[in-house]
Image (cartoon, helix red, strand yellow):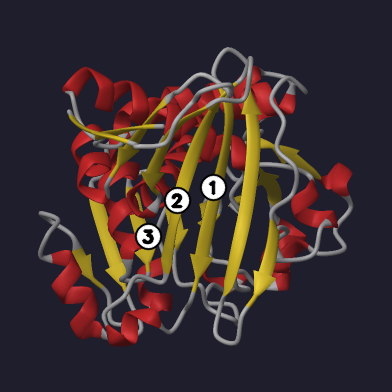
Amino acid sequence: MNSSASDSSHDGGAPPFSLLVLSEADVAASIQGPELLEPLANALASYSAGQATAPPRVAAKAADGWLGAMPAYLPARGLAAKLITVFPGNPGWGRPSHQGLIALFGGEDGTPICVMDAAETTALRTAAVSALSVRMLARDGARTLAVLGTGTQARAHLRLVPAVRQFAEVRLAGRTEERARDLAQDFSGCQVAPTFEACVKGADVVICCTDAPRPVVRQCWLGKGTHLVSVGAGAEVDDATVAAARIFVEWRGAVTTPPPAGAVELQGLDPDRVAELGEVISGDQAGRTSEEEVTVFKSTGLGVEDAAVGWAVLGAARRLGLGTEVSW
């Protein structure tokens, strides 16, 4: 573990402290993904039980994107805050669409403990929460997985969702078949479908990672018993699907809080019509109630998820001796 010392004096002031800085490479070396499932399940259950806290995301808009802030508190862990920028046009010139930092603070005295890159954590925590929804809500006989999208989130979902179910068939579709084929090459047995419709029809689990401003899935494409996950900030799911399916969310504010904190597709929905995934995990709400029921998990992100992942990364990085210590 590297270290650097500050020249500043602490005479008459607060005692010095050490802050661990974790780069993107440090974070990537600390986590693989599957080990995040249980910390995330515990965090969501704690939030739904009123023990963990996470106020709605706030955002400052720029010309071509926005900066979001997501603070949270996890009992027995501490405080955390993620700062994340979302600039959809970035991939066009070689930059990630999502960039940011996670900061961790002691829960007893608020002392800064760690700052880490949030690119890898954001991708993996989103996919891991989707995987939790598949574990809790997909029907037992689910054997075909369909992923829509070809970006960072699609890659993370192809990596993590099969960790909770054994799929006999994995399909992928994107806006261009060429990009889909490039991504599919990294996943053995992944089949490329020519259209979103062809990818979705007959699938048991459908994951939308497109960030599309208009629906990419139609209710008429979904078979009985399908579990659908939407992680894009846009309107990926059509109104007919929302009306017909059972809806699950990370927090009920997804239907009452405007975007970017809430879900575009769920605005105006009765909060009593949705269930929180944490409630299903803890057994306070029923999950799937029949083999034929269509279930939808709409992910908007929640600060306790980033807190859970951040603390998990910190623990792993310390064990591995990664990062740079900065003292002042």
Q: Which residue is mark 2?
A: 101
Residue drawn at x 69%, y 28% is 47
* Camera-nearest residue between 107 and 66: 107
Q: Mark 1 or mark 2, which has the lower sequence index?
A: 1
Residue 190 horizontal side relative to residue 223, left or right:
left
Residue drawn at x 34%, y 43% is 161
Q: Is residue 293 visible?
A: no
* Camera-nearest residue between 253 and 140: 253
Q: Mark 3 or mark 1, which has the lower sequence index?
A: 1
* Camera-nearest residue between 301 and 5: 5
Q: Is residue 67 visible?
A: yes
The amino acid marked with disc number 1 is: Lys
Q: Mark 3 or mark 2, which has the lower sequence index?
A: 2
Q: Nearer the viewer, mark 3 or mark 1?
A: 1
Q: Which residue is mark 1?
A: 82
Label pair 1/2, CB-CB below 8 angstroms? yes
Q: Which residue is mark 3?
A: 153
Cα separation, mark 3 vs mark 1, equals: 18 Å
